[in-house]
């Protein structure tokens, strides 16, 4: 019981008359990597929005580190230790790497409110440590993010979560827009995080990626959790069947991996 | 933001040198005398640019956040008028406030800046909290502030100012004030949280918001500061002219914006430096002074300025073409 990092009971979200998420019971333990899969509109993003504080659930409970929580904003979730890598990366193109990593939580000395002086040395050092921890190689940290490749940008966004030693990392389609080499780069970072025992929730449409990287696969269908599969024992066909709700056999000869 | 922007300033600086040398050459060819090495001319150039320069430093910050401020000239005029009414010497014929004569200079100075800040605050609050593009509220402020400046003394100037106050505009004082403001805001923009947030909001306001920066509050602060600097410019302008006139500072906002853009501030937000703006202000000043020196008609001057601004904006668009995926 004590090693459950996050759990939800009966988590539900309605938007007006639309039941986007119904009765989600979910849990993730220390060191576990879980993938959330499902068709578009199945409720994956809705579920993530509830647990990261972007929205407030209609009903149900969220328990983080043994305490019931109610996040009123993404900042609440971040302060609690839940870091999210958004699909649009939330990076500022004209700023450099340390500036982006510390966006919104800059280190200062001489607290003068908005006119506090930035502790750039400390931020550079911590940024370097975070990048080393995720084995990301960026030749010049003072380069602006806008000048970097999609893969490098993604790596910076992920390192941002690692720099702040978060308790739970959530990644929403981290490799959706990346090429093969860059995808491998990101997947290696995820493996590094696994070695370090950081729990991770991964939303992905890429079933090969999911089967290679995670421990458990939670399948959403039509707003509900349709089931949970063990990544070691399941296969692509089984996952797809659960996603679409059709019996196995129809997809026997199809290749989804 | 990165150290690589130093070469960018170098190229603008070279343009400044180039423009100055061009006028120097033309000076010898057309007028038979030096343009630059004229001990009377150089101080005049820098004096003219001090007032625009102070405004431009405020406008630079607004543009970095992705906004614009069209009200600077009018706010400067209004601030000057109100400040002057607190700076009158005793025994004058047209006292604005019957009992308030010979006040210490700090009073009209603070009043002027405060009026500017109030106007800036209105600009910022409307922009940030209604989502209306800043063009609109600052355009409204441009018109309203000018109107208030006229109404303030029924269309009349405010005259008879104390020596202490006019000293703010005498000799090299405007240049010193400009230099101090420039240095101060160079440090603020490059080394403080305020500066970092300004660039962040301009570069990707949504990312800044998601990361926990209060974008709305920050925008209000930036516009307030820009207004305060316009107020300071109004005080300096008034001190130099030894009177406040409702029509002063006309179109100064355009010169200030031009100087910022020439100096490398991007109208798309996220980029710009105080050092670049200072050079931009000097370039505009040299051009203005050079045309006067060569006795070229004022309107040709305006055409030339317009073309230079156009070139600067197109160059900026080209630079940003990469940002918008037009490699």
Image (spheres, coloured by chain):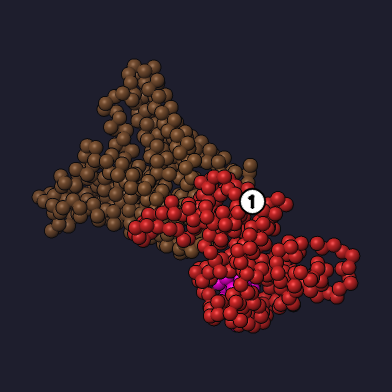
The answer to if A219 sits in the magenta stretch is no
* Pointer 1 local density, CA inside 10 Å: few below 14, some 14–19, many at least 20: some
* Towards the viewer: B19 or B116: B19
* Towards the viewer: B55 or A245: A245
Q: Residue furthest front?
A: A195
Query: Which residues, given as a range, are shown in magenta?
Result: A47-59
Residue B326 image point, x, y percent = 63, 44
Q: What's the residue at 33%, 50% (across, down)?
A: B229
Relative to B156, B218 lies left or right: right
Chain of residue at mark 1: A
Residue B106 image point, x, y percent = 20, 53
The chain drawn red is chain what? A
Q: Residue furthest left?
A: B91
Q: What's the residue at 13%, 49% (across, down)?
A: B89
Q: How many numbered marks have been drawn onto this rendered protein structure?
A: 1
Residue A173 image point, x, y percent = 67, 62
SS for callout 1: helix
Report if residue B281 is visible in the image: yes
The quarter of the picture where residue A147 lies is top right
* Towards the viewer: A11 or B144: A11
**Which residue lies under the disc numbered 1?**
A150
The quarter of the picture where residue A41 lies is bottom right
The quarter of the picture where residue A248 lies is bottom right
Report if residue A219 is visible in the image: no
> In which quadrant will I find the C terminus of chain A?
bottom right
Residue B94 image point, x, y percent = 16, 51
> In which quadrant will I find the N terminus of chain A?
bottom right
Q: Chain B hue? A: brown
Q: What's the residue at 82%, 63% (across, down)?
A: A256
Q: What's the residue at 59%, 57% (across, down)?
A: A134
* Towards the viewer: B298 or B212: B212
């Amino acid at each position: 019981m004590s090693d459950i990092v996050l759990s939800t009971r009966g988590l539900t979200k309605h938007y007006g008359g639309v039941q986007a998420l119904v009765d989600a019971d979910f849990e993730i333990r220390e060191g576990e990597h879980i993938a959330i899969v499902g068709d578009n509109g199945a409720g994956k993003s809705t579920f993530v929005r509830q647990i990261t504080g972007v929205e407030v659930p209609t009903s149900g409970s969220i328990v983080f580190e043994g305490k019931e929580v109610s996040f009123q904003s993404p900042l609440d979730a971040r302060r609690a230790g839940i870091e999210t890598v958004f699909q649009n990366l939330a990076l500022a193109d004209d700023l450099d790497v340390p500036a982006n990593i510390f966006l919104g939580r800059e280190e200062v000395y001489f607290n003068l409110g908005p006119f506090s002086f930035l502790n750039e040395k400390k931020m550079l050092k911590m940024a370097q440590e975070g990048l080393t921890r995720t084995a990301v190689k960026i030749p010049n940290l003072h380069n602006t993010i806008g000048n970097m490749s999609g893969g490098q940008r993604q790596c910076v966004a992920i390192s941002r979560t690692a720099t702040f030693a978060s308790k739970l990392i959530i990644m929403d389609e981290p490799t959706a827009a990346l090429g093969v080499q860059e995808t491998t780069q990101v997947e290696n970072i995820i493996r590094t995080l696994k070695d370090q025992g950081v729990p991770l929730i991964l939303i992905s449409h890429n079933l090969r990626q999911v089967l290679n990287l995670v421990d458990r696969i939670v399948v959403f269908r039509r707003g509900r959790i349709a089931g949970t599969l063990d990544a070691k024992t399941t296969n692509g066909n089984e996952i797809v069947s659960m996603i679409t709700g059709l019996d196995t056999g129809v997809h026997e000869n199809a290749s989804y991996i | 933001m990165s150290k690589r922007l130093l070469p960018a300033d170098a190229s603008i600086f070279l343009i400044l040198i180039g423009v100055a040398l061009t006028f120097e050459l033309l000076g010898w060819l057309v007028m038979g005398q030096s343009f630059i090495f004229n001990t009377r001319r150089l101080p005049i150039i820098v004096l003219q640019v001090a007032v625009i320069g102070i405004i431009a430093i405020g406008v630079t910050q607004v543009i970095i956040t992705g906004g614009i401020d069209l009200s600077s000239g009018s706010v400067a005029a209004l601030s000057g008028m109100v400040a002057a009414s607190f700076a009158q010497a005793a025994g004058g014929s047209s006292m604005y406030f019957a009992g308030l004569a010979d006040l210490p200079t700090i009073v009209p100075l603070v009043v002027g800046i405060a009026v500017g800040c109030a106007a800036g605050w209105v600009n910022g609050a409307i922009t940030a909290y209604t989502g209306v593009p800043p063009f609109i509220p600052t355009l409204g402020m441009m018109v309203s502030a000018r109107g208030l400046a006229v109404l303030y003394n029924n269309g009349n100037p405010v005259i008879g100012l104390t020596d202490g106050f006019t000293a703010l505009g005498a000799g090299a004082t405007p240049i010193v004030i400009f230099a101090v403001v420039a240095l101060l805001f160079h440090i603020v923009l490059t080394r403080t949280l305020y500066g970092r947030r300004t660039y962040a909001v301009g570069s990707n306001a949504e990312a800044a918001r998601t990361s926990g920066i209060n974008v709305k509050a920050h925008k209000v602060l930036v516009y307030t500061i820009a207004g305060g600097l316009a107020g300071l410019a109004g005080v300096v302008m008034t001190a130099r002219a030894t009177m406040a006139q409702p029509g002063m500072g006309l179109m100064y906002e355009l010169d200030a914006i031009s100087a910022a853009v020439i100096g490398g501030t991007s109208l798309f937000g996220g980029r710009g430096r105080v050092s670049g703006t200072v050079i931009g202000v000097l370039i505009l000043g040299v051009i203005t002074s050079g045309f006067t020196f060569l006795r070229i008609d004022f309107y040709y001057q305006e055409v030339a300025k317009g073309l230079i601004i156009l070139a600067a904006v197109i160059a900026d668009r080209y630079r940003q073409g990469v940002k918008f995926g037009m490699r």
